[in-house]
Image (cartoon, rainbow, N blue to C red):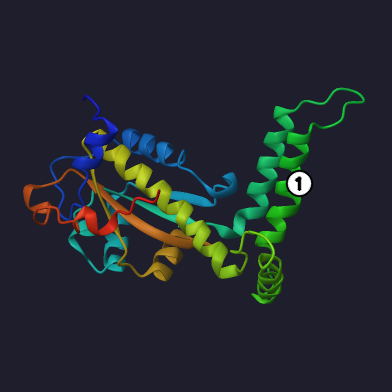
Amino acid sequence: MEEKTVSAAIEYRRSVRVYDPEKPLDTALVKKCIQQASLAPTSSNLQLWEFYHITSKSMIEKISPLCFNQNAAKTAQQLVVFVARKDLWRKRAKANLAHIDSLYPKSPGSKPSSREQFAKNYYSKLIPFTYVDFFGLFGWIKYLIILIIGIFKPIYREVRQKDMRIVAHKTAGLAAQNFMISMAAIGYDTCPMEGSDTWRVKRLLGLPRSAEITMIVSCGIRKPEGVYGERFRIPFEEVYREVK
């Protein structure tokens, strides 16, 4: 199978609601697309995401009612659940620090370069300052501090608990888009589903309370009736602004 170019894959991708039951997916190829999803941009390279690849019919049958039995779920050959894991920031920061150490091997008596020291300070000081919170209270204290400093200079302002949740979900959303374009490139179809009982899906998958589902993406090969009409977009001129 010849893969499509990025532009062709974007044009080909549609949210498909009905899949062909006679055309199964190659699980290894879907997994490869998930691997490509993990190459998506991610805030501070923290990679606050997890991907749950559902391949068994029995599990799809359990999840479908939790997606309100929409056709995109009922007829799916496979599902991928994109999960935001803001709670893993400490673990991911440590992984980045270990990676930095591997990039800058030490020799006796050597001092860290300015770039190495900046990177280590970023993950050992700035990231904890941004992500640490106590029932939302510390977030508001940080927010007030930022408001005052922001009077005098530009500063990063998204430091409350709810702000970091948005950051984690944006990261997981970027990964989901990578995945769907990668699937389209090999002629596989997807549909991102917002409609689901995320609490019950989390319980079914055994996810911790702190994990949050960003979206569930159904996968398969489209049937002609699976694409609901021609693509509609607001005229580009209404959403495009060139700033000079």
Residue 222's place in the image compared with 214, above or below, is above
Q: Secondary structure at mark 1?
A: helix
Of 48 and 123, nearer the camera is 123
What is the x, y in percent for residue 166? 50, 63
Say which residue appears at 22% left-offset and 53% top-offset: 236
Which part of the image, by quadrant, shows the N terminus?
Answer: top left
Q: Judge from the rendering whether residue 149 lies leftward or rightward of residue 76; answer left or right.
A: right
Amino acid type at circle 1 is Asn
The reply to whether residue 210 is in sight is no
Say which residue appears at 71% left-offset and 54% top-offset: 126
**Residue 65 found in image quarter:** bottom left
Q: Judge from the rendering whether residue 42 lies leftward or rightward of residue 62; answer left or right.
A: right
The residue indicated by pointer 1 is 121
What is the x, y in percent for residue 235? 18, 56
Say which residue appears at 32% left-offset and 37% top-offset: 182
Number of numbered tags placed on the structure image: 1
The reply to whether residue 94 is in sight is yes
Of 60 and 133, nearer the camera is 133
Check the image and name the residue furthest to the right.
109
**Residue 31 found in image quarter:** top left
What is the x, y in percent for residue 63? 32, 61
Of 83 and 120, nearer the camera is 120
